[in-house]
Image (cartoon, rainbow, N blue to C red):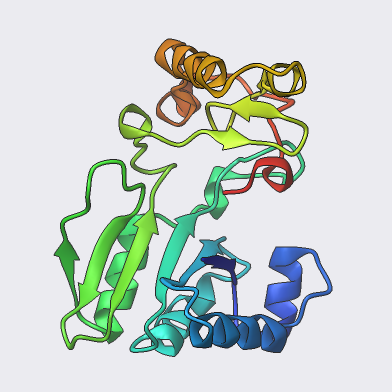
Amino acid sequence: MTVSLDALDEATFARMSGTGARVADVLAGIAAAREAGLGPVKINMVVRRGVNDGCIEEMARHFHGSGATLRFIEYMDVGSCNRWSRAEVVSGEEIVRRVGAVLPLEPVAAPAGEVATRFRYRDGGGEIGVITSVSRPFCGDCVRGRLAADGSFYTCLFATSGHDLRALVRGGAPAEAIADRLAAIWAARSDRYSELRASLPVVSGKVEMSRVGG
């Protein structure tokens, strides 16, 4: 189970989330999920310089020893409405250095296809993950497709268009045909946006995170 929580301070959380959600409600939901056995629980924190980067250490301390894994995510230019600026990106390297200064860390080997670089607390207080799509892209190892509610299948979080699967499903195509279609789409993918970001012109029309999730 993955939960988005970008700060423990209400005002900062509201600015990052753009919703009326309350931190207390999110924390209560996390506790309820763990009590119900819906683990492992991951907490995603997008870090944006000048907005919530001052919360890095506080978030690490809060979830240290909690049994939940805190994952720090570099601020990305997902979609077209967040007015992204590279100057607001806090690198994964800086995040690890800052967390390690207050709660010493050591690296953990991650399985193939894992998007987060993993570290564990040396005192046994659990793990953190760092997702570095901007500073250290991992396009070549990406194994994640995303399906929107309208049946569009996206091969990249930064894609501008998807592949229609709804027509196949509603047309009564057998599961094998749908699987073959997915395999063909994935085999033909050439997405390398994160690796090429610095050399590309501004790309408009990218799918919004709210449609495809993280």
Asked if 119 appears above or below 211 in the picture, the reply is below
Q: Nearest the camera: 109 or 61? A: 109
Q: Is residue 157 visible?
A: no
Task: State left or right for residue 214 relative to residue 160.
Answer: left
Which of the 4 image quarters holds residue 60?
A: bottom left
Asked if 18 appears above or below 66 in the picture, the reply is above
Q: Residue at x 50, y 19 (%)?
A: 176
Q: Residue at x 55, y 87 (%)?
A: 31
Q: Residue at x 75, y 39 (%)?
A: 149
Q: Position of residue 48 (x, y in %)?
A: 57, 60
Q: Residue at x 26, y 61 (%)?
A: 118
Task: State left or right for residue 9 relative to residue 124.
Answer: right
- Outermost residue, right side: 20
Q: Nearest the camera: 152 or 6? A: 152
Q: Position of residue 129 (x, y in %)?
A: 35, 63
Asked if 19 appears above or below 12 in the picture, the reply is above
Which of the 4 image quarters holds residue 5?
A: bottom right
Q: Position of residue 26 (x, y in %)?
A: 66, 80
Q: Is residue 143 visible?
A: yes
Asked if 153 appears above or below 18 in the picture, the reply is above
Task: State left or right for residue 165 relative to residue 22.
Answer: left
